[in-house]
Image (cartoon, rainbow, N blue to C red):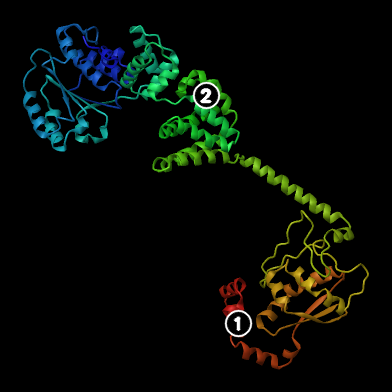
Amino acid sequence: MSYLVLARKYRPMVFGEVVAQEHVTRTLVNALAAGRTSHAYIFSGPRGVGKTSTARLLARAVNCKNPAGQDPCNVCENCRAITVGNSLDVLEIDGASNRGIDEIRDLRERVGYAPAVCRYKIYIIDEVHMLTQEAFNALLKTLEEPPSHVIFIFATTAPHKVPLTILSRCQRFDFKAVPTVSIVEQLEKVLAAEKIGMDREVVEMIARKADGAMRDALSLCDQVIAFCDGDYTVEKASQVLGILDAELFLELSRLVAARDTLAVVQFVDRLAENGVDLEEFYAELARHYRHLIMFKLGVKDPSALDIPSTHADSYAEISRSFDLEDLVRSLQLVLGFEETFKFSGQQKITLELLLIRLTMLEKSVNISELIGRLEQGRTAAVQNVQQARSAPDQTSAAQSAGPAGGYSSAPAGEPEIRSTSDTAGRKSELPDREAVMPLVAEGQEVDLGVIRHHWPGLVDKVKNVSRKLWSALGSAEPVSYENGRLVLAAPGNAYTLDLLSRPDSRQAISDVIRRSFRLDSVSVEIVPTREEAGPGVKREREGSNPSAESFDQLCRNSPLMGKIKDLFDPELIS
């Protein structure tokens, strides 16, 4: 007799043997007990989770001559015929190869005939979503009102492809992927029945590779048994299953934690030399970072993460080398690179680039910690300012001394003097007394010559108050200083004269001069340059720029134009 593979040999024969589908089997058992079986069912779900097996089991249960409760006896004539596929009343149809309207018409004709032996005639259509639209339409009326002796059972892995008109006429049961733990338990039962001793770690490896499909797990188990020939080691099982050793990823995480960029590049070289499938490695890398995140969150049971129990301690140890935020950012980076990697013509280089970036990720900083650092810096800056202000004037002058006649910046730690709008109606923000360093010794006499000597430095100091005022003042020069009254001659340009003649501008210039020369008070007066002074100034200005006065008048009459004048250079727009 030929060998029967495990996936066929260990099909579930009673409802209790269907693995991890209790929500389906309990409903069917209760319906059988209450005599409330439906005329049509649709079993949907991923491959290898028991859809067709449950359909055959239901067919035996409704046709069994000697049922054991709600389970079939599996020994009567009807049960044996259905099990081996010889029953005339239980027809299994492949929807992929019998998908046309002619096959469905033939099915409709046969539905009217009574069952030959069994109580019910059962039609099991596998992969029903492969039927054509015309075939579905031909099936509608029969499916809605079939004869009382007919039951339809549809199985599909793509329920979204089945028309809603079909779904609405069936009881739908959604089969779920089998958990890894349940697959391990079922494999151990099968191996015990086969009298095969296999390490649990190898069994777990098979279960993880099956990815939720019980049939796949049994098929892989057959492969491992054939390949290992009694020596069921992790190394041999990894070869036949094509599974990457978890130690590879643990080693990579250690290199990333150490930020050893060269080592991770050499790590990729070793993968390529050993013939590792880089796409499979990439997929496992994302799962690896998920495992680290789960351990960082406090998960204790390694079986819940589909990792070998022997590596649980290593995962817990490595997860402590990273912050949770860093692990999350790393996983986001891996997932973000996935499309680039998959469609890259240089997958090895792309993988190297990803791992290099993982080693170069900056450590995450908590926002509250960052705010605390900023507060500490602000407190230190305020303390430095207070210390600078409490120091004697001579010490401050010595610390910030610059070129003769020039302007030196404020002491370290002191806030920068910010300029404010110098428009009419707004108060200019002037520098503090300590921010404007005296240019002469205390008690030294100040005359027009001293002011002219230090005039460039004075102009630079005004720059800290207002850049507009500084630009206009650069074209002016001192022409007279008597009894605390300083006269500045400026070009007859309407904009420059208007800006310098404003009260807030003259006050700002006065404050800078007063503090620079240790004077009690200084009044500033702005006059046109000598060649433009006199009654002819207005006529000359009108001749040079006839629209200046009309523009000024427009700005005074219109608030909007006044704002435009403040934002732009009036010489350009007038």
Q: Residues within 10 Å of mark 2 (few under 14, many from 20)?
A: some
Question: Total label count?
Answer: 2
Sequence-first tag of 2 and 1: 2
For badge 2, the amino acid type reads: Val
**In this orientation, does residue 323 appear?**
no
Q: Secondary structure at mark 1?
A: helix
Locate residue 311, reporting x and y percent. 51, 21
Q: Residues within 10 Å of mark 1 (few under 14, many from 20)?
A: few
Is residue 50 left or right of 208 when viewed as pictured?
Answer: left
CA separation in Å, label 2 and label 1: 76 Å
Seen at 82% across and 79% down, the residue is 486
Question: For mark 1, what is the residue?
Answer: 553
In the image, is residue 376 above or below residue 229?
Answer: below
Locate residue 321, reporting x and y percent. 60, 30
Question: For mark 2, what is the residue?
Answer: 299
Seen at 79% across and 71% down, the residue is 458
Seen at 12% across and 27% down, the residue is 145
Q: Quadrant of residue 366?
A: top right
Q: Nearer the viewer, residue 177 or 9?
A: 9
